Image: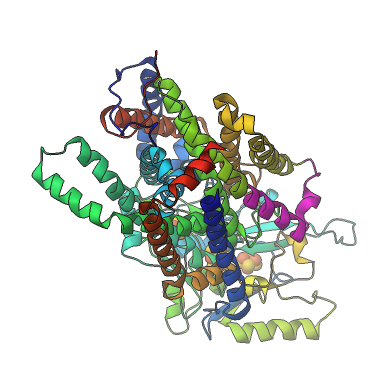
């Protein structure tokens, strides 16, 4: 604990070349978003009646929700299970989760046909719908994330606005409720996201369609949490020239060994029980995608993380963690796009250039805002590297 | 290491507990069918259909759909397989299932397709806001004032029926056959297609009645029909049913499970969220854990342990 300074604004110059690159990506996405609101979804996407969901649902929404899992998994570890040693990474993970979910909402706003009606599920309840459950949890969780983040903003402006200070006091008293609520809501909607495809047994490829899809989504989200923290911390600390915090990250990934092991075990066990390994060797795009997901995303990084040297070397640790993250993203893409094989399809879906640029633009915006937040708010607590 | 181990056990207990209870739920409290008791039904006798497309034309007029690019009496459209879309709620396709006439020419068979108005519709179960509803008279209808355009109904429909107005920037609608809801709500009213068919290939009536008629026809003339009523059991049954002399797979019909598709997701959902027991239990367990772990932490008991674990 003594290795860490208090979280504080990093006070480095904001306008670096990297920030301009992000701005360029954001600018590239803008015309396509505009076009979507002038000419309709069909104009900028390759979506059809047969393929109603594409890249924006598979990546912006489904993967975005999974990648934000660092927020609730670190909160659980540090605040609920009392491992205060890990508090150094809870704030950046919380920030990522908050930005991630905000952009899940933005992504949905662009993707749904009637953006102006996005609030309607709050009024017209349809509790049989899995999507309704997911939407409600995400909406409430987003609010909880903003509340959890409030004290960090308040800390920055302490003593300047009496209103903010007293609100901060109330929130801090109730913080335990929000922290637990955040974990509960996350478990609910992470698994709910997996239940979405259960309604389409004839469309989702058997390598992915299983009744335990919700459990697989939950366990993969939980095992992804710490690797995601590793990835973002190593990126942030290297680009901001801060200490790598290996003393926190190394032990974190030891926990991942068990979590990822459970996920991998469930996944392989499920394949054996349902006998879907017969599809592994049929040479289809789906078999290839499934093998890539399992090998590069689960098995290889899991084996890597057993080696102590990997857990202690930033480069290797980053590689292993990034593979886990990539594996879960690929899993979401597989479930929502690659494995989605509807009848009557003349050719398969491939995202249009507009869809790709909007997704890249949204990711760039998240990174831009992350950079902005850590520059001016007390989020990171790593020490500056001795020059 | 101790604490982390305890943490793992907790987490996995919660995950496994959730799975087990979902399984247990499947066994006992399977979600019930919400099919209406006495809906209308349509029986299409494919052996009678001559592919005249009058049903398409009637549908177009009744629903005030835009004029088609190719006229309804132009049979060239039958050369390729079409799907219902935002401007055509029903389409007729032509197949050559293999039978030949005396001159050795393949005999065509025609099949009219539209929304099946399933008894337990996946689209209705999926819709996030309840914009799609199954009516007492059997129709599955759409309320655009609720729809948010998420297109989950399209993902869910096993028949690939709902179409979408991808060219509308702000007010796109989900478009599909309405079963002529307004017309059949009136005494003696029939769907446009059923009332116009020149050879009476389509019989409209109570579902039970037309289903009995279908079985009767098959029984009386087993040489003419294969022994199957398509739509009787597919995904829990539908309001549209078909009889044919050719196997249905040869006429573009999908082979589907008998169980209604909403059963599995709704059972899991309802088991997990009945009285919110799962989230409440998880909340309580976490709150308990938080209290235990943090009190220990505060007495300093764990600090050495933690150090030991992290330095190893
Ligand atoms: S055919 Fe499709 S759209 Fe029609 S009721 Fe069934 S699930 Fe809904
Ligand atoms: S697109 Fe409209 S009708 Fe279809 S599921 Fe979404 S809200 Fe319901
Ligand atoms: S109107 Fe009757 S005969 Fe003509 S295509 Fe339609 S169902 Fe067949």
Between B104 and A309, the residue placed more toward the observer is A309
Task: Please state the quadrant of the image where ligand 3 appears.
Answer: bottom right
* Residue at horizontal 56 percent and vertical 79 percent from the top: B29
Residue A25: x %, y % from top left = 41, 24
* Above or below for B29 versus A368: below
Where does the image place residue B166, in percent across and percent down from the top left? 45, 46
The coloring applied to the image is rainbow
The quarter of the image holding the N terminus of chain A is: top left
Instruction: Name the residue rendered at 60%, 27% in the picture.
Output: A316
State the residue in front, A127 or B105.
Answer: A127
Name the residue nearer the viewer: B114 or A141: A141
Seen at 39% across and 50% down, the residue is B300
Q: Is residue B234 magenta?
A: no
Residue nearest the observer in this picture, A214 or B97: A214
Q: Main secondary structure of the magenta part?
A: helix
Is residue A263 covered in magenta?
A: yes
**Residue A228 relative to residue A156: left or right:** right
The x, y position of residue A109, in whole percent, is 37, 45
**Can you give x and y, in whole percent of width and height, for residue B89 in the image?**
52, 60
Q: Is residue A312 left or right of residue A70?
A: right
Q: Which residues are magenta?
A: A261-283
Q: Is residue B179 visible?
A: no
Q: Can residue A311 be seen in this snapshot?
A: yes
* Most distant residue in the top direction: A387
| Quadrant the C terminus of chain A occupies | top left
Q: How many marks?
A: 0
């Amino acid at each position: 604990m003594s290795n860490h300074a208090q979280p504080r604004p990093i006070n480095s110059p904001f306008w670096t070349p990297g920030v301009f690159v992000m701005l360029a990506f954001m600018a590239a996405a803008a015309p396509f978003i505009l076009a979507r609101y002038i000419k309709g979804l069909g104009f900028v996407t390759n979506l059809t009646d047969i393929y109603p969901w594409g890249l924006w649902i598979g990546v912006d929404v489904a993967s975005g929700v999974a990648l934000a899992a660092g927020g609730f998994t670190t909160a659980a570890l540090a605040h609920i299970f009392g491992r205060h040693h890990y508090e150094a990474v809870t704030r950046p993970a919380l920030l990522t989760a908050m930005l991630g979910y905000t952009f899940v909402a933005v992504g949905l706003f662009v993707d749904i046909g009637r953006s102006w009606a996005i609030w309607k599920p709050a009024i017209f309840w349809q509790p049989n719908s899995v999507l309704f459950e997911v939407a409600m949890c995400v909406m409430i969780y987003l609010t909880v994330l903003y509340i959890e983040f409030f004290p960090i903003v308040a800390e920055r402006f302490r003593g300047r606005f009496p209103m903010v200070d007293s609100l901060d006091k109330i929130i801090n008293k109730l913080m335990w409720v929000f922290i637990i609520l955040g974990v509960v809501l996350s478990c609910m909607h992470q698994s709910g996201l997996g239940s979405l495809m259960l309604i389409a047994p004839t469309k989702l490829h058997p390598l992915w369609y299983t009744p335990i899809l919700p459990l697989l989504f939950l366990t993969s989200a939980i095992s992804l949490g710490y690797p995601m923290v590793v990835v973002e911390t190593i990126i942030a600390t290297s680009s901001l020239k801060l200490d790598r915090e290996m003393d926190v990250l190394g032990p974190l990934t030891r926990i991942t060994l068990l979590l990822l092991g459970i996920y991998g075990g469930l996944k392989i066990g499920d394949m054996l029980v349902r006998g879907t390994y017969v599809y592994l060797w049929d040479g289809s795009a789906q078999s290839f995608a499934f093998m890539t997901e399992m090998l590069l995303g689960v098995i290889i990084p899991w084996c890597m993380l057993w080696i102590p040297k990997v857990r202690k070397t930033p480069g290797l640790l980053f590689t292993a963690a990034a593979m886990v993250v990539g594996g879960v993203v690929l899993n979401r893409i597989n479930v929502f796009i690659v494995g989605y094989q509807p009848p009557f399809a003349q050719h398969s879906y491939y995202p249009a250039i507009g869809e790709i640029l909007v997704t890249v633009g949204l990711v760039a915006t998240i990174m831009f805002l992350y950079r902005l937040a850590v520059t001016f708010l007390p989020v990171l607590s790593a020490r500056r590297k001795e020059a | 290491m101790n604490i982390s181990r305890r943490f793992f056990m907790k987490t996995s207990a919660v995950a496994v507990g959730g799975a087990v209870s979902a399984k247990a739920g499947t066994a006992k409290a399977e979600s019930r069918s919400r099919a209406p008791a006495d809906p209308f039904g349509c029986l299409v006798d494919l052996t009678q259909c001559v592919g005249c497309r009058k049903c398409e034309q009637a549908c177009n007029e009744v629903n005030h759909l835009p004029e088609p690019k190719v006229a309804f009496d132009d049979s060239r459209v039958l050369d390729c397989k079409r799907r219902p879309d935002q401007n055509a709620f029903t389409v007729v396709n032509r197949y050559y299932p293999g039978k030949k006439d005396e001159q050795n020419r393949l005999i065509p068979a025609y099949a009219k397709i539209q929304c099946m108005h399933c008894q337990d519709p996946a689209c209705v179960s999926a819709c996030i806001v309840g914009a799609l509803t199954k009516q007492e008279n059997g129709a599955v209808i759409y309320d655009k004032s609720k729809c948010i355009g998420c297109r989950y109904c399209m993902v869910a429909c096993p028949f690939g029926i709902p179409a979408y107005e991808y060219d509308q920037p702000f007010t796109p609608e989900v478009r599909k056959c309405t079963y002529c809801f307004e017309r059949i709500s009136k005494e003696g009213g029939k769907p446009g297609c059923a009332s116009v068919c020149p050879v009476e290939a389509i019989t409209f009536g109570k579902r039970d009645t037309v289903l009995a008629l279908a079985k009767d026809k098959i029984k009386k003339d087993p040489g003419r029909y294969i022994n199957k009523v398509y739509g009787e059991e597919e995904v829990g049954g539908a309001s549209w049913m078909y009889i044919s002399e050719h196997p249905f797979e040869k006429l573009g019909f999908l082979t589907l499970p008998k169980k209604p598709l909403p059963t599995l997701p709704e059972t899991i959902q309802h088991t997990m969220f009945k009285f919110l027991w799962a989230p409440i239990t998880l909340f309580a367990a976490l709150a308990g854990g938080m209290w235990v772990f943090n009190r220990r932490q505060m007495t300093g008991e764990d600090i050495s342990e933690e150090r030991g674990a992290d330095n190893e």
